[in-house]
Image: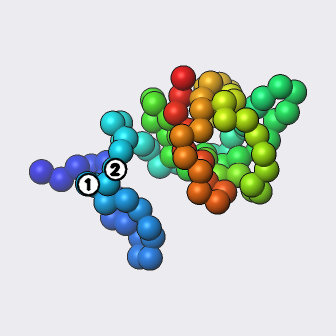
Amino acid sequence: MADDNMKPTPMGAQWPSPSEERRDILRRRIFKGGTIEFGSEAIPCTVRNVSAAGASIEVNSPLWFPDRFVLAIDGERHACRIVWKKERRLGLEFD
């Protein structure tokens, strides 16, 4: 039985294989604007995928921001922490 949440990996992409996947909950691919909020700062970002447990975002430049912040997407706010970084991409876990 095929898993409807699994999509083919694009040619040349470096996605983890299913055996390397570390998430307990599959994420839904999206492409939405979001905001990283901390203190009085708000930095725009692009949300690439999201689940009930976390998200993957992309920032325009590798600016410094704290390991914990609030991610705002479509009026929803999620307290989160960074669990991995790779260039301009960040993996987040919701608190």
Along the viewing direction, whichever of 27 and 31 lies nearer the viewer: 27
Quadrant housing residue 69? top right
The 10 Å Cα crowd at callout 2, few under 14, some 14 to 19, many 20 or more, is few
Is residue 2 found left or right of 18 in the rendered image? left
- Residue 21 x %, y %: 34, 50
84 versus 62 height, above or below: above
Residue 17 higher or lower than 5, as above or below? below
Return the x and y of residue 42 as percentages of the image width and height.
Answer: 82, 35
Q: Is residue 25 above or below residue 40?
A: below
State the residue in front, 76 or 69. 69
- Which residue sits furthest bottom? 12
Q: Which mark is residue 21?
A: 2
The residue that disc 1 covers is 19
Verify CB contact (< 8 Å) between mark 2 and mark 1.
yes
Residue at left offset 83%, top offset 25%: 39
Q: Amino acid at mark 2?
A: Glu
Numbered disc 1: secondary structure: loop
Foreground: 79 or 1?
79
Q: Is residue 74 visible?
A: no
> Dot 1: few (<14), some (14–19), or many (≥20) neighbours within 10 Å?
few
Q: What kind of residue is marked 1? A: Ser
Give the Cα separation between the discs numbered 2 and 1.
6 Å
- Number of numbered discs on residues: 2
Report x, y in % for residue 32: 63, 46
- 29 sits to left or right of 92: left
Residue 63 appears in the rendering: yes
Callout 2 secondary element: loop
> Could you tell me residue 70's position as x and y percent?
68, 28
Residue under the image location 32 percent in, 54 percent down: 20
Q: Is the C terminus in the top left, top right, bottom left or bottom right quadrant?
A: top right
| Above or below, 13 relative to 28 | below
